[in-house]
Image: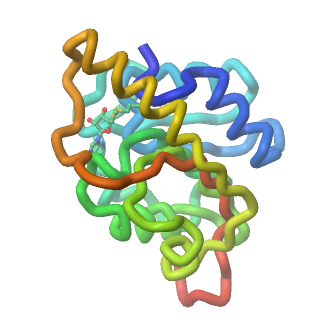
Amino acid sequence: MNGHPGGEAHTRRMLSLAGLRPGARVLDLGAGAGETVALLRSLGYEAQGLDLEPLSPLVAWGDLLGTGLPSGSFDAVLSQCAFFVSGDVPGALAESRRLLKPGGTLLLSDVFFEPPEPLFRRAGFSLSHAEDITELWRAYYLEALWREDEICPAVRGKCAYWIVICTKEERHGPV
Ligand SMILES: C[S@@+](CC[C@H](N)C(=O)[O-])C[C@H]1O[C@@H](n2cnc3c(N)ncnc32)[C@H](O)[C@@H]1O
């Protein structure tokens, strides 16, 4: 089961907003049970996924805060509901930026405690799309509570859930 609000429909929406070319190399960070990796492959992308607790053979073990993968090796990095859970969003953004090729795209859907634009600018990305889907996330979160699923205990206070598509800025500094 998808571990993010909106499920596959929202993954497809992110891909369509990003306009990735067929065959692009895409890395899913915090890929969980691998549904998004499977979808990406079915759509013709060269996809791989990493997670601290991989739940499928489609996903390899890896820490999104330090993947050990070569710099500049992906056309796109995607992550859904995992950067916040990692406990270090700036660290996750820095590792994503390192992994991207020049001009590469980051596709994110996640919980944020601050407006995304300044956060992403500081991390060396320029935003092409930012969409607040907090209402959808609230419904998803309530359903998870109702099912007694494991939920993230760190989500407290006034936060929002955003879809963000952004591009690696070259002027920010070395990869
Ligand atoms: C809410 S689940 C989302 C899973 C998947 N992205 C999805 O949408 O179905 C969050 C995932 O992030 C993973 N995760 C948390 N911290 C991580 C880290 N530092 N490195 C890799 N994965 C991490 C967890 O193991 C979990 O599978």
Q: Quadrant of residue 26?
A: top right
Q: Is residue 16 above or below residue 55?
A: below
Taking the image as shown, residue 15 lies to the left or right of residue 115, namely right
Identify the residue shown where x is 51% and y is 67%. 115
For this orientation, the residue located farthest to the top is: 147
Q: In front here: 77 or 17?
A: 17
Identify the residue shown where x is 41% and y is 33%. 31
Residue 96: image location, x then y, percent: 48, 61
Give the number of callouts.
Answer: 0
Q: Quadrant of residue 138?
A: top left
Q: Is residue 147 above or below residue 17?
A: above
Q: In front here: 131 or 46?
A: 131
Identify the residue shown where x is 49% and y is 69%. 98
The N terminus lies in quadrant = top left
Q: In front here: 54 or 17?
A: 17
Taking the image in four quarters, ligand 1 sits in the one at top left
Q: How is the image coloured?
A: rainbow
Residue 124: image location, x then y, percent: 56, 78
Taking the image as shown, residue 55 lies to the left or right of residue 169, namely left
Residue 158: image location, x then y, percent: 34, 54
Residue 133: image location, x then y, percent: 57, 41
